[in-house]
Amino acid sequence: MSSTLRNLLFSLVLVIGVAAQDAGQRERLQKMATDLNLTDAQKEQLLPILQEEGAKLKELRADTSLDRRSRAQKMREIQQSFQTKINPILDEEQRKKWEKMREEARDEMKKNRGKRNR
């Protein structure tokens, strides 16, 4: 395979990957918008934050040098950073609802983790 063709294929895969990731973040934003009744201005502010978080999480998943504990710590740091950035964008009612949604998601993950360990 020529280097030009190989570079073209690599570029295509990269573009497809970025587009898929962006679509995932836009889908997540749409769910948040619906659940939290976000304004257009809030959605506009949140999208780059979601995209940044998605990129960091993707990078973390690709890092094979980390052990499980280190990966979990990094994930918590990314999530905390995300939370710190979105809190000022949400109003009080939205923050309360967002926290409830996060709590329900954590409970669901714990429940599913228990099923896997049986």
Image (cartoon, rainbow, N blue to C red):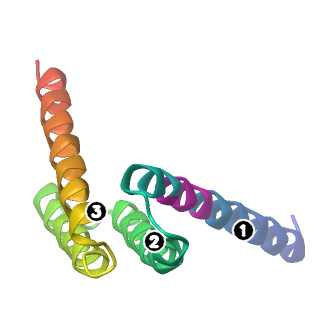
Residue range highlighted in magenta = 22-29
- Residue 24 placement (x, y as % from top left): 54, 55
- Asked if residue 118 is positioned above or below residue 97 in the image, the reply reads above
- Residue 51 placement (x, y as % from top left): 49, 72
Mark 1, other Cα within 10 Å: few <14 / some 14–19 / many ≥20: few
Choose top left, top right, bottom left or bottom right for residue 63: bottom left
Q: Label 3: which residue?
A: 94
Residue drawn at the location 52% of the way across and 55% of the way down:
30
- Asked if residue 94 is positioned above or below residue 7 in the image, the reply reads above
Q: Label 1: which residue?
A: 15
Which SS class for mark 3? helix
Residue drawn at the location 12% of the way across and 36% of the way down:
110
- Residue 4 placement (x, y as % from top left): 88, 76
**Closer mark to the observer between disc 1 and disc 3:** 3
Magenta stretch, main secondary structure class: helix
Which SS class for mark 2? helix
Going by the numbered disc 2, the residue's amino acid type is Ala
Q: CA distance from mark 2 to mark 1?
A: 14 Å
Residue drawn at the location 14% of the way across and 29% of the way down:
111
Examine the structure image and report whether residue 26 is included in the region drawn in magenta.
yes
Q: Label 2: which residue?
A: 55
> Is 72 placed left or right of 51 in the picture?
left
- Asked if residue 112 is positioned above or below residue 109 in the image, the reply reads above
Dot 1 or dot 3, earlier in sequence: 1
